[in-house]
């Protein structure tokens, strides 16, 4: 006689976890973990960063399930992929912006960051262009890209809207990059 296998949907597993049974969460992670990692690696080809994004997703899912703030019960795989994709992009976009803008603003020490020294031929001209910006613009760029201050807070400081400040800084960054690429 065969054992009867009980198959739970993702929504049922989430409810099971919210009712105190950790096996529901473990089953979800077992069921979708490898697929999620493969999904990211196929798009970004950076295994370590993809693993980090997956780990952050499972932590955020655990928190959402525990706090009962997860509402999309019938769309778990879609929510999982979208959330992890955004986590990956945010982590890596912010990291690359911070490294790039720090290199432009502050001349790094010799061994401070190997990634910066690889691009020194691009950073030196960009640093010269950056030095020609107004003190206000330099301050706004440093506040957002180095210190991680939100556009809304910068807008309050300069008595302007967040969208206006973001747009102004974005235009300046595009202009700097265009000038840099035209000098080649």
Image (tube, rainbow, N blue to C red):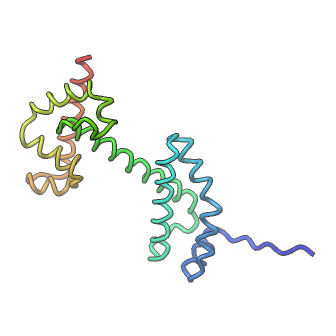
Give the mark count: 0
Q: Residue furthest right?
A: 1
Q: Residue at x 29, y 32 (%)?
A: 117
Residue 183 placed where, x, y %? 23, 18
Q: Nearer the viewer, residue 6 or 46?
A: 46
Q: Is 106 left, or right, of 19 in this rendering?
A: left
Relative to 87, residue 103 above or below:
above
Q: Quadrant of the C terminus?
A: top left
Q: Residue at x 89, y 73 (%)?
A: 2
Relative to 122, residue 2 above or below:
below
Q: Residue furthest front?
A: 111
Q: Residue at x 39, y 46 (%)?
A: 92
Q: Residue at x 7, y 37 (%)?
A: 134
Q: Residue furthest left?
A: 135
Q: Nearer the viewer, residue 91 or 121?
A: 121
Q: Residue furthest top?
A: 184
Q: Is 61 left, or right, of 127 in this rendering?
A: right
Q: Nearer the viewer, residue 50 or 78?
A: 50
Residue 111 placed where, x, y %? 28, 38
Residue 87 placed where, x, y %? 43, 53
Residue 173 placed where, x, y %? 22, 35
Q: Is 46 left, or right, of 182 in this rendering?
A: right
Q: Quadrant of the N terminus?
A: bottom right
Relative to 60, residue 108 above or below:
above
């Amino acid at each position: 006689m065969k054992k009867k296998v009980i198959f739970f949907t993702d929504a049922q597993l989430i409810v099971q976890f919210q009712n105190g049974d950790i096996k529901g969460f473990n089953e979800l992670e077992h069921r979708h973990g490898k697929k999620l990692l493969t999904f990211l690696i196929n798009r970004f080809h950076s295994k370590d960063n993809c693993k980090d994004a997956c780990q952050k997703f499972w932590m955020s899912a655990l928190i959402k399930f525990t706090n009962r703030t997860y509402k999309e019960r019938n769309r778990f795989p879609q929510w999982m992929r979208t959330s992890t994709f955004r986590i990956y992009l945010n982590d890596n976009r912010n990291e690359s912006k911070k490294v790039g803008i720090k290199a432009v603003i502050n001349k790094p020490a010799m061994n401070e960051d190997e990634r910066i020294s690889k691009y020194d031929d691009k950073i030196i001209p960009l640093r010269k262009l950056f030095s020609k910006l107004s003190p206000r613009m330099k301050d706004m760029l440093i506040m957002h890209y180095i210190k991680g201050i939100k556009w809304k807070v910068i807008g309050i400081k300069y008595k302007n809207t967040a969208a206006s400040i973001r747009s102004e800084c974005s235009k300046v960054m595009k202009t700097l990059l265009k000038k840099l690429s035209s000098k080649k």
